[in-house]
Image (cartoon, coloured by chain):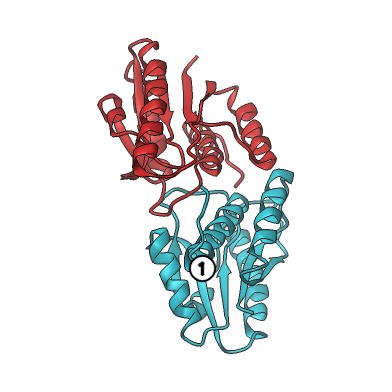
Chain colours: A red, B cyan
Amino acid sequence: MFKINVICIGKIKEEYLTSGIYEYSKRLKRFCDLNIIELREESIFNESSENINMALEKEFCLIENNIKKQNNNKYNILLDINGEMLNTIEFAKKIFDLQNNNISQINFIIGSSYGISNKVLKYIDFKLSFSKMTYPHQLFRLILLEQIYRIFKINNNEIYHK
Amino acid sequence: MFKINVICIGKIKEEYLTSGIYEYSKRLKRFCDLNIIELREESIFNESSENINMALEKEFCLIENNIKKQNNNKYNILLDINGEMLNTIEFAKKIFDLQNNNISQINFIIGSSYGISNKVLKYIDFKLSFSKMTYPHQLFRLILLEQIYRIFKINNNEIYHK
């Protein structure tokens, strides 16, 4: 089964987000093997740029380890406010094309509230932006899952009740 | 107190969205007088374009009545996928400028899952787009409230924990 990994930082704190994410994870089961990989978030007590960079560095190592242990037919999409903007149909087509192009899993990588180390870029195949607006990274997990569900519905010619 | 109305169609069906919206409504209380005005959603059993247009027409009448009974110092923002995209800082500045320009209330107008009648445009001062992606209109209420909360935090020089 086609594999979707959402690689993200930190545990969800808000219960309503946990419930929403659970809801879409459930619905996605018939379309893909979904894994939400929550990596350890570094605590930053003093927000100096040095401390932030150190935290991002540690978080990057966890992301890197995760990507490295996967098989080769993967495609890594970084969620990045400055990435390319696609509409839902274009996003659906992109995933459809990847599935038909020997890709067996997609990693969606979401940084923490402080962002993500630039070192991750060497692994990235595509930078995708949902918005020019800054969303909270935890709410964004829900937004992303809804959109992934939506594109699988579209790619399977199913009606989507908005 | 500065008034923010979110004019939208239909009751929220998912409990996790209700909880999330409640959370941000609570947090927004110290910044503005927030009203979420849920207008009656028309049921469409047969999705012909005629039926959809009839439903949008009825929904427009409710929106129009709502806008008309308000005082004059209002500013109407339509949430529209084809509207202008702002980043969070630009959005914050826009609201700040309105507040300093004799505007005492802002209406954010969100259509239903079928959209909104073009007739609403004569009332609209600004069309704002959050994304090229299509979001569910119910999830979008949560996204919008979080962003409004974020811009009030920014405009009040408060730190925002993302």
Rendered location of residue B151, percent (x, y): 50, 63
Tell me residue B154's x, y (percent): 48, 63
Using a 10 Å C-alpha cutoff, classify the residue at mark 1 as few (fewer than 14 neighbours), some (14 to 19) or many (20 or more).
few
Which structural element holds mark 1? loop
User: What's the chain of the residue with tag 1?
Assistant: B
State the count of labels: 1
Splitting the image into 4 quarters, where does residue B107 fall? bottom right
| Residue positioned 48% across, 65% down in the render | B157
- Residue extending farthest left: A122
Left or right? Give the position of A42 relative to A100: right
* Residue B88 left/right relative to B153: left
Q: Is residue A152 above or below residue A69?
A: below
Residue A148 visible in the picture: yes
Q: Nearer the viewer, residue A86 or A101?
A: A86
Up-down: is B12 above or below A52? below
Residue B29, given in percent of the width and then of the height, sits at 68, 67
Q: Which residue is labeled 1 in the image?
A: B156
What residue is rendered at 34% in x and 39% in y?
A50
Which of the 4 image quarters holds residue A100?
top left
Residue found farthest to the front: A46
Give the camera-side residue of B41 and A105: A105
Residue nearest the observer in this picture, A15 or B112: A15
Residue at the image position 45 percent from the left and 67 percent from the top: B92
Side (left or right) of B123 relative to B56? left
**Quadrant of the image containing the N terminus of chain B:** bottom right
Residue at x-position 50% and y-position 80% = B99
- Identify the amino acid type marked 1: Asn
Query: Quick check: A144 above or below B45?
Result: above
Q: Position of residue A63 (x, y in %)?
A: 40, 23
